[in-house]
Image: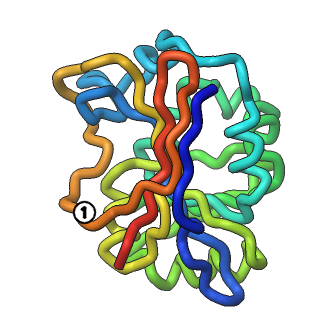
Amino acid sequence: MARHERGRGAKRIAGRGLTQYFTATSLDGFLADENGSLEWLFKTPHADDSTRWQDFFSQVGAMAMGATTYEWALDHDALLERPDRWHDYYADVPCWIFTNRDLPRIPGAELRFVGGKVAPVHADMSAVAGGKNIWIVGGGDLVGQFHDAGLLDEIHVSLAPVTLGAGAPLLPRRIEGMHVASVSQDGERVNITYEVRA
């Protein structure tokens, strides 16, 4: 596996971890295709190495997720019928679901349904995370709201060798001044970590 790293990583604020967006995208910048599907991603080749994910998630103390992402997970993994799958993926890490409507709750999962501005919710998440990192699972607009509030520290993106032409964009925001912290090859994918500068 080829790897390139530079810099010291995003600057931590005393008492809280980093707020990170960890995701995958098509070569032309889409998270999901125009039908909201991620099947294209599961078909793209990558190395059979879970170290990157394990290293990342071991440092996560809280998660945030938009309503569309949550509903996709419910449907794709049949989480209402198989709530054990949520625990297999995310253990007991608490997750804040940002939504303006009533959504079904996964039995036994540590979920908090919230709305409104992200800054006060981020403060709650940081307190619960206890110095560990916050993972913004998706979607792109929610990540953009964290960035708009000055709360996004890093973007970890796996670039897949697929073009979709249309779909849900990686980040529907203009963000400039990012710094490449690391690059690594993962089979036919390329993993890039960007530091987000205020």
Q: Position of residue 26 (x, y in %)?
A: 34, 27
- Taking depth in this image into account, of 133 and 10 the one nearest to the observer is 10
Which residue position holds label 1?
Answer: 175
Q: Position of residue 105 (x, y in %)?
A: 64, 48
Quadrant that contains the C terminus:
bottom left
Give above or below for 163 relative to 43.
below
How many numbered circles are shown? 1
Give above or below for 192 relative to 34.
below
Quick check: can you spot residue 16? yes
Q: Position of residue 85 (x, y in %)?
A: 76, 31
Give above or below for 158 relative to 177.
above
- Taking depth in this image into account, of 102 and 69 the one nearest to the observer is 69
Type of amino acid under label 1: Ile
Image point (53%, 57%), residue name: 6
Graded by Cα atoms within 10 Å as few (under 14), some (14 to 19) or many (20 or more), the crowding at tag 1 reads few
Q: Residue furthest bottom?
A: 14
- Dot 1: element: loop
- Taking depth in this image into account, of 40 and 153 the one nearest to the observer is 153
Image point (75%, 59%), residue name: 59
Image point (55%, 24%), residue name: 76
Q: Position of residue 62 (x, y in %)?
A: 68, 64
Coloring applied to the structure: rainbow
In the visual, does 3 lie left or right of 79? left
In the visual, does 188 lie left or right of 145? right
Quick check: can you spot residue 136? no
Image point (63%, 26%), residue name: 1
